[in-house]
Amino acid sequence: MKTIARAVGATLLLAATLGGNTRAAERPDDPLAGATLEKIVLVARHGIRSPTRAPAELKAQTGRDWPAWPVPPGQLTAHGRAALAAMTDALGQRYRQFGLFPATGCPAPEAVAIWADAADDRTRQSGAIMADHLAPRCGLQSRALPAGHADPIFNAVGTGAAKRDETRATKALEQGVARDRDHRSPPVQAALTRLQALVAPDGCARPAGPCLTEPLTLSNPHGTPHLTGGPLLAATIAENMMLAYAQGMAPEQVAWGAPNAAALLATVLPAHGYAAALTRRQPAFAVPRGAVLSRAIIDLMADLPVTLPDHSAIGPNTRVILFAGHDTTLDTLAAIFGLNWAFTDQPDFTAPDTTLAFERWRLKDGSRVVRAVILHQGLEQLRAARRPDLAGSGAATLPIGTCAGATLCPAGTLRPTTIF
């Protein structure tokens, strides 16, 4: 698994105001000068939620008191709805400027399709919010399977639409355990050390812990491999601290009164990225899990029809397709297409509202290319529920690893990675 690296040198194509024109800014050095944006597939993480475990359970794991939230575990908050609405307003503005939505009025009924994961309220609600704000007052609808139903779009393994090779998965985790034992990167080690000092300074000396700096171990109950150990708990702690900060909580609620919570988050969140890199960004896990979604993206970029789990179809006239999913969804696609990114203003690279875009452009010579763009809100923008600048720092073009690292991939050559 490649190290998550900072995406630099992003092509910022929205620097000029384009009105309703579909053409990119005309700059001599712009590889898309004179090109036309024809279609996009957006894959978004849901809005800000509460931790998926109750405060009492988190206290049992960590020994520390955790703040109460205004909603039950794992649910979207009112602040999260507002922040996601602001993000979607910015997405709508971006793609109106590129001509995928009319400058005035509403898109044709078949031009937009929005599909949300049915597994959780937070994804279904996020899909509805994005439908309301992508093209306001146009009556867009987000659809999903019935509540609680497993959806192969978001987890093909969980529905039986794809099968994971448990031998390969075990080998990938064994290699991760070995790397964790022999070499943790300095940012990861610093994150674990800081969290240990903050949460349980003597935890590694007590039998009950928690010891966040301990080595990872591999267990394989019933033939299903998974990792255990302090770094995984550290990842959960770091993410829950970030969610509390993004929710707008006071410093004593974010990190037990530790000063400068934003700087602290920048130090500890590499633990969260580390856990993702060791597990869900491993191709042995990502490729089967994302088999249905990645195939759908490739087919949509080629104007092939895609049948959704409710047996409805997305046809070639649909120009904007949005999937409302999870951070796991973003991690899965990053692994499948060889995408890496990080942000200067957001220490969590799959934070709430983060959206991955696959854009298909027609060049002046008539050929078509696919571009991957990561769109996000900075940490302070999430905390303030503020609209990001998707014409500037909120958007970055990504090299596509499975297209030889190109930022413009010939549409017919977009491919997923393999696990072989």
Image (cartoon, helix red, strand yellow):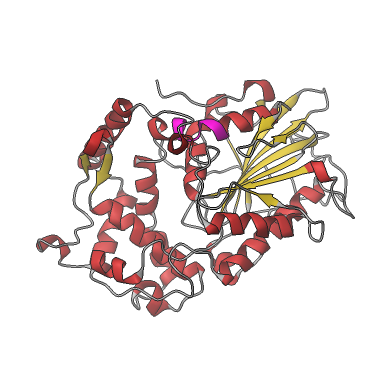
Query: Can I make out residue 1 in this image?
Result: no
Say which residue appears at 47% left-offset and 55% top-offset.
Answer: 348
Left or right of 391, for residue 125: left
Say which residue appears at 21% left-offset and 40% top-offset.
Answer: 219
Asked if residue 111 is positioned above or below residue 270 in the image, the reply reads above
What span is colored magenta in the figure?
287-293
Say which residue appears at 33% left-offset and 76% top-offset.
Answer: 256
Q: Does 104 lie within the magenta span? A: no
Left or right of 190, for residue 159: right
Asked if residue 140 is positioned above or below residue 321 in the image, the reply reads below
- The location of residue 37, given as percent across then percent down, is 78, 37
Q: Quadrant of the N terminus?
A: top left
Q: Quadrant of the C terminus?
A: top left
Give the main secondary structure, helix, strand or loop, of the magenta stretch: helix
Among the 4 quarters of the image, the one containing residue 373? top right
Among the 4 quarters of the image, the one containing residue 304? top right
Query: Can I make out residue 248 in this image?
Result: yes
Asked whether 264 or 131 is in front, the reply is 131
Left or right of 100, for residue 293: left
- The location of residue 253, given as percent across then percent down, is 39, 77
Q: Does 288 lie within the magenta span? A: yes
Asked whether 376 or 325 is in front, the reply is 325
- The location of residue 333, given as percent across then percent down, is 52, 37
